[in-house]
């Protein structure tokens, strides 16, 4: 019999877990009855400070399909996804959020697409951003346009982490052991045939989002730095342009002074030029600093996550 692992990263989601469990249990029973597909659900507790772990343990005691991994602290969603993939055992592996913004009922269609249409992955994307602040939606669209123009890989606008993959693709992702992880980029980078399912945005079933605008901004920077070196080229181009403009301006000032005797404006113009050049220098140094910082973290070879405990029925790797 084929098996499916469902990876569910969680951080302070004690309210949403019971509701998610009820829905995923229905889907697990459906898949088992119709397709003889055995399901395991691996919830990854990402160092939650509320009763998330306690709630998971209580549910896991009564249902063998529910398993868990708990981190020693909060390592972030990317680490939680990697840990879940690493400890999954299914022939097919799904990743989804616990807040039910990812419709569990799509798992059946995903499974059939892989089985009948020979896809390696069936992923999802939102066609609407209903319920999101307009400013957040605007910057999200700008990010996708920007990274797709600068990067050699394609990241679909509105793409979610919610997807079902074959074991072959999961093994390829696990082999990408970089510390600074951007899963949407990794999913595209490893390749494989992917089918996209579209659906309208759904509201969270409970709790509040952990992604502030600032966190999303930093996450987008991680994606850009991880999958393109275009900002480094832009910094070089800006430097060349500044030198070119400076040479032209020097020539203009010399001609004006020699031919027309026009004196060069002093203090105000000098301050403006100093501030402009200084700002551009700091901007370019900042770009270099981002790449250097990521390189520095990679060379430390720190583990992607540290596991504190796991469910007793979880097999050791």
Image (cartoon, helix red, strand yellow):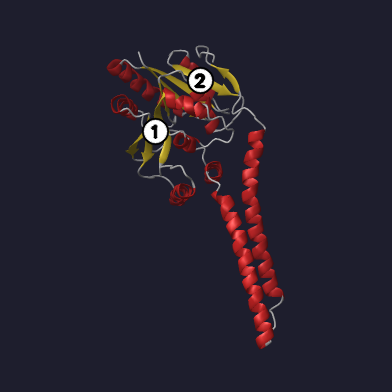
Task: Look at the numbered disc 1 and give the secondary structure of its residue.
Answer: loop
Q: Nearer the viewer, mark 2 or mark 1?
A: 2
The residue positioned 35% from the left and 43% from the top of the image is: 127
The residue positioned 49% from the left and 29% from the top of the image is: 173
Q: Measuring from the top left, give residue 30's x and y in whole percent.
A: 31, 20
Q: Is residue 156 visible?
A: yes
The residue positioned 33% from the left and 27% from the top of the image is: 114
Q: Earlier in the sequence, mark 2 or mark 1?
A: 2
Q: Measuring from the top left, give residue 217's x and y in whole percent.
A: 54, 46
Q: CA distance from mark 2 to mark 1?
A: 22 Å
Quarter placement of the N terminus? top left
Whether residues under marks 2 and 1 lie with C-beta atoms below 8 angstroms apart, the answer is no
The answer to whether residue 218 is left or right of residue 115 is: right
Q: Which residue is mark 1?
A: 102
User: Does 225 sit above or below residue 238?
Assistant: above
Quarter placement of the C terminus? top right
Q: Which residue is mark 2?
A: 87
In which image quadrant can residue 202 be found? Answer: top left
Q: Residues within 10 Å of mark 1 (few under 14, many from 20)?
A: many
Residue 93 marker:
none
User: Does 257 sit above or below residue 13?
Assistant: below
The residue positioned 44% from the left and 13% from the top of the image is: 62
Q: Measuring from the top left, give residue 293's x and y in whole percent.
A: 65, 42
User: Does 5 sit above or below residue 210?
Assistant: above
Q: Residues within 10 Å of mark 2 (few under 14, many from 20)?
A: some
- Front residue of 43/281: it is 281
Q: Residue furthest right?
A: 267
Q: Measuring from the top left, give residue 172's x and y in whole percent.
A: 48, 27
């Amino acid at each position: 019999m084929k098996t499916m692992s469902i990876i569910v990263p969680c951080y302070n989601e004690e309210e949403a877990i019971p509701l998610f469990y009820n829905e995923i249990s229905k889907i697990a029973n459906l898949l088992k009855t119709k397709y003889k597909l055995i399901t395991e659900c691996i919830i990854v507790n990402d160092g939650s400070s509320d009763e998330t772990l306690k709630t998971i343990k209580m549910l896991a005691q009564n249902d063998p399909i529910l398993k868990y991994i708990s981190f020693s602290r909060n390592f972030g969603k990317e680490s939680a996804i990697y840990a879940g993939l690493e400890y999954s055992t299914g022939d097919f592996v799904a990743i989804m959020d616990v807040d039910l913004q990812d419709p569990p009922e799509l798992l059946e269609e995903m499974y059939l697409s892989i089985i009948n249409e020979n896809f390696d992955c069936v992923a999802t994307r939102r066609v609407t951003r209903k319920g999101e602040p307009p400013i957040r939606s605007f910057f999200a669209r700008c990010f996708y346009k920007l990274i797709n123009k600068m990067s050699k890989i394609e990241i679909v606008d509105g793409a979610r982490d919610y997807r079902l993959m074959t074991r072959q693709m999961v093994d390829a992702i696990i082999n990408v052991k970089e510390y600074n992880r951007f899963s949407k980029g990794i999913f595209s980078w490893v390749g494989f045939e992917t089918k996209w399912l579209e659906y309208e945005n759904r509201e969270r079933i409970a709790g509040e989002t952990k992604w502030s605008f600032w966190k999303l901004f930093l996450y987008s920077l991680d994606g850009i730095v991880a999958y393109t070196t275009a900002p480094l080229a832009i910094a070089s181009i800006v430097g060349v342009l500044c030198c070119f403009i400076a040479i032209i301006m020097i020539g203009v000032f010399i001609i004006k002074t020699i031919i027309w005797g026009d004196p060069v404006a002093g203090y105000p113009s000098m301050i403006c030029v100093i501030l402009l050049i200084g700002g551009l220098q700091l901007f370019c140094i900042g770009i270099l600093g981002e790449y250097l910082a990521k390189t520095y973290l990679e060379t430390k070879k720190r583990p992607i996550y540290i596991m504190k405990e796991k469910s007793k029925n979880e097999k050791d790797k």
